[in-house]
Image (spheres, helix red, strand yellow):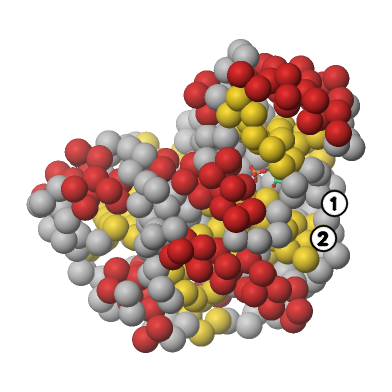
């Protein structure tokens, strides 16, 4: 089978690595990919939202399945584009339709869905420019800190947490009246602040059946001890020591099952991955957000723990036969440490030569922001590489990743040295 994988981050290099282990795979294409995916398959210079070019590439390379990494193509309707095109309809797209991707594409949709199906989530209300004054009154009824969320996709920047009321009022006004996040903030969700520890859970579903992937914890802040600005993610570990037994049962019973039942009650057939961003509040898993894709850098820790044929798993999503496929998990721990460019998540330079990857032993190196240039590998993004290791304990996995992270060099390399510190 020929597969086209969309995306260019560490998640996609990990997916490509996993897919490439399947005897069912003939050729793998990645659009646009990075220097890591180029060692596994063929990179195509196509952006993930150029649906016409993606359709053409499917013809040219006789693609039998498209697997979507990031959210944008899903929220913009790539699955629907394939279904609406007679020449593409027979190619399964692993990733939900536009309507189903609203779970990530609209915070207001997601919150209304969570409320309707009685899934634990923070109390909230949604406001528009016209109801700004009501929004300000609502803020007065809450206790600090205040959580404001732009409704639409905002490249991970649409959530603002304000410690003070006046700051929250200014922020709400700038989101609604001054379109701070463009059309994405034409609606704003204001919700109660939840105090707890975060956890990422994942399922793969064919619309009827589901399989639960290993859970993970992601470290979003740039600085040691979870300080400083948010990033795309600085590292991850799996399994998560506090998320065992009863909590995981609650995640399945209170979150996963009602979500899938709710989708089905809404007449939405969801085929693909669902990422549940959860907050453990005294044993109850509150949903902070849904994503219609896998997480990054969670995928770098989660996929190595999944044993078996990932192509078979994706094929079963397309066929509606996930109940027929077994999925075994590696019981060991994985830990991923993200190496990032100096300045990230603010402005940073690209094009720095990366050396020492060949010195790494006993860890995987998953490329994120890298590309090939004149036979060298150079940085091409803020998050550059993820170093992932197995260990019998989380500490052993981390130790191996840190040892190998030292061996990789590029100008301005930075990484957090305290991944897992809170566990
Ligand atoms: P999101 O983009 O929805 O993942 O939100 C970004 C981050 O904001 C989350 O990972 C949480 O750390 C934080 N966050 C979002 N909603 C809440 C909430 N209701 N209470 C506390 N923290 C939150
Ligand atoms: N690691 C969080 C995300 O992928 O959104």
Q: Residues within 10 Å of mark 2 (few under 14, many from 20)?
A: few
Of helix, strand and loop, which one carries label 2? strand
Residue 348 visible? The answer is no
Quadrant of the rendering where the N terminus is positioned = bottom left
Assess disc 1: are there few (<14), some (14-19) or many (≥20) residues with their C-alpha within 10 Å of its C-alpha: few
The front one of 60 and 242 is: 242
Mark number, residue 281: 2
Q: Is residue 139 left or right of residue 104?
A: right
Q: Are marks 2 and 1 in contact (CB under 8 Å)?
A: yes
Residue 234 x/y as whole percent: 67, 48
Q: State the residue at coordinates (37%, 75%).
A: 313
Task: Residue at 62%, 14% (x, y): give it.
Answer: 177
Does residue 419 appear anywhere in the picture?
yes
Q: Earlier in the sequence, mark 2 or mark 1?
A: 1
Q: CA distance from mark 2 to mark 1?
A: 7 Å
Q: Is residue 27 left or right of residue 207?
A: left
Quadrant into which the C terminus falls: bottom right
Query: To which quarter of the image does residue 3 belong?
Result: bottom left
Horizontal and vertical percent position of residue 367: 48, 51
Residue 162's mark? none
| Location of residue 166 (image quadrant) | top right
Where residue 45 sits: x, y (%)? 27, 39
Of residue 40 and residue 162, the one placed in the foreground of this image is: 162
Above or below, 408 against 166 in this view is: below
* Drawn side of residue 419 relative to residue 80, left or right: right
Is label 1 in a helix, a strand or a loop?
Answer: loop
Q: Is residue 195 above or below residue 370?
A: below
Q: Nearer the viewer, residue 360 or 149?
A: 149
Image-quarter location of ligand 1: top right
Which residue is labeled 1 in the image? 195
Mark 1 C-beta closer than 8 Å to ligand 1:
yes
Percent across and percent down for residue 392 are 70, 80
């Amino acid at each position: 089978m020929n597969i086209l994988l969309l995306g260019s981050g560490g998640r996609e290099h990990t997916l490509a690595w996993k897919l490439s282990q399947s005897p069912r795979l003939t050729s793998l294409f990645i659009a646009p990919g990075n220097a890591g995916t180029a060692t596994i398959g063929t990179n195509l210079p196509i952006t993930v939202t150029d649906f016409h070019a993606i359709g053409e590439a499917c013809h040219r390379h006789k693609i039998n399945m498209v697997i979507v990494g990031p959210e944008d193509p899903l929220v913009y309707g790539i699955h629907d584009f394939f279904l609406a095109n007679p020449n593409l309809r027979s190619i399964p797209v692993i990733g939900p339709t536009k309507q189903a991707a609203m779970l990530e594409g609209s915070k207001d949709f997601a919150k209304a869905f969570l409320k309707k199906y009685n899934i634990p989530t923070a109390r909230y209300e949604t406001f528009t420019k016209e109801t700004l004054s009501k929004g300000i009154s609502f803020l007065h009824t809450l206790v600090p800190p205040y959580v404001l969320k732009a409704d639409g996709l905002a490249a991970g920047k649409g959530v603002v947490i304000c410690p003070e009321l006046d700051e929250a009022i200014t922020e709400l006004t700038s989101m609604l009246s001054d379109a701070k996040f463009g059309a994405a903030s034409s609606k704003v969700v204001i919700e109660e602040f939840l105090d707890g520890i975060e956890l990422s859970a994942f399922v793969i579903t064919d619309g009827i059946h589901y399989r639960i992937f290993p859970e993970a914890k992601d470290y979003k802040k740039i600085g040691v001890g979870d300080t400083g600005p948010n990033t795309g993610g600085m590292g991850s570990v799996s399994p998560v020591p506090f998320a065992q037994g009863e909590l995981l049962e609650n995640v399945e019973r209170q979150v996963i099952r009602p979500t899938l039942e709710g989708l089905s009650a809404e007449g939405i057939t969801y085929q693909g991955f669902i990422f549940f961003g959860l907050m453990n509040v005294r044993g109850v898993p509150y949903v902070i957000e849904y994503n219609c894709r896998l997480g990054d850098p969670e995928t770098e820790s989660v996929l190595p723990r999944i044993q078996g044929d990932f192509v078979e798993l994706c094929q079963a999503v397309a066929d509606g036969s996930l109940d027929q496929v077994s999925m075994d998990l590696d019981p060991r721990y994985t830990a991923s440490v993200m190496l990032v460019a100096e300045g990230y998540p603010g402005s940073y330079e690209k094009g720095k030569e990366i050396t020492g990857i060949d010195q790494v032993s006993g860890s995987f190196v998953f490329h994120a922001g890298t590309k090939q240039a004149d036979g060298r590998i150079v940085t091409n993004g803020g998050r550059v590489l993820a170093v992932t290791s197995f260990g019998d304990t989380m500490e052993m996995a981390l130790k191996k990743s840190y040892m190998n992270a030292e061996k990789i060099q590029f100008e301005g390399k930075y990484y957090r040295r305290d991944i897992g510190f809170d566990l």
